[in-house]
Image (tube, rainbow, N blue to C red):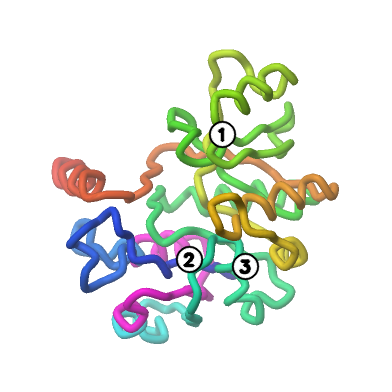
Amino acid sequence: MKAVILAAGKGTRMKELTQEKPKPMLRVQGRPILEHIMLGLQAAGIREMFVVTGFKAETIEEYFGDGSRWGWRLHYGRQVVQDGTGRAPEVAREFVGDSPFLLTYGDILVRPETYQRMRERFASGDYAGLLTVTAGEDVSKGAVVVLDEAFDLVTLVEKPGPAQLAELRGRGLLREGGPYWYNAGIYIFRPCLYEFTARLQKSPRGEYELTDAITAMAAAGHRLAGLVIEGRWVDVRDPEVLARLEREEGAS
């Protein structure tokens, strides 16, 4: 299996920390966030990776090179126009070829064993994709994921408001009081994903949304598995999260 890592954004919420480097290159315990992710992928047997770069792309490319120092085979491509998560994987389309691939954002940290659990769950059935979920997050800031009794995807709604959550509860798709599953931003897809990203229209906020492609896949009858992330899941979204990571790691 291959991996595609989305690392094109600047990370404006990091303020002055990302003036000279992209957010995935900020360090946690001496290593860039991106390096932690790649080491976790390597532990799951994934050594061929494609990094989608954009802001300060050369910072990433110069640090990692071809990846041979770590035993990886790294490839790069630049997302010139950053118009949404639905378009970003297109940069890696030739790299993906006919292979299933793990897709992750370059600022999400999980335990290394999470990637292996994803591979095992994906291989457990005839799935076109897999998405990870976590509980306890504010779904209005991400996406709420609706799963059936087999923990396969029914649908997901990006940044749902109170009315949308009420509608899902009214249809029996969400239980009153939760838990609500939050889209954790790490996936596995077969290349059929690209059939759906190619058809995307811009969302109301003016971007091509990866979640719209996933919803379309499910609506077209493709099976997508769900998997709960166990243990650590950190969206390194702002300086406060970065500082907390340093404190927690330093105390352990």
Depth check: give the residue in front, 225 or 210.
210
Query: Which range is magenta?
Result: 35-60
Q: Callout 1: helix, strand or loop?
A: loop
- Residue sticking out furthest to the right: 221
Q: Residue at x 63, y 58 (%)?
A: 202
Give the left or right position of residue 144, taking residue 221 as reference. left
Distance from Cα at disc 1 to Cα at disc 3:
33 Å
User: Which amino acid, mark 1?
Assistant: Pro
Depth check: give the residue in front, 50 or 114.
50
Measuring from the top left, give residue 113's x and y in whole percent: 47, 50
Quadrant containing the N terminus in the rendered view: bottom right
Q: Which residue is under mark 1?
A: 160
Q: Mark 1 or mark 3, which has the lower sequence index?
A: 3
Q: Callout 2: helix, strand or loop?
A: strand
Q: Residue at x 51, y 75 (%)?
A: 50
For marks 1 and 3, give the one nearer the viewer.
1
User: Which amino acid, mark 2?
Assistant: Leu
Q: Which mark is residue 239?
A: none
Quadrant containing the C terminus in the rendered view: top left
User: Which amino acid, mark 3?
Assistant: Met
Q: Which mark is residue 1?
A: 3
Depth check: give the residue in front, 162 or 130.
162
Q: Which residue is under mark 2?
A: 6
Q: Mark 1 or mark 2, which has the lower sequence index?
A: 2
Question: For the residue carrying disc 3, how many other residues have a C-alpha within 10 Å: few (<14), some (14-19), or many (20+)?
Answer: some
Distance from Cα at disc 3 to Cα at disc 2:
17 Å
Give the answer, above or below, for where 193 lies relative to 98: above
Question: For the residue carrying disc 1, how many other residues have a C-alpha within 10 Å: few (<14), some (14-19), or many (20+)?
Answer: some
Q: Callout 3: helix, strand or loop?
A: loop
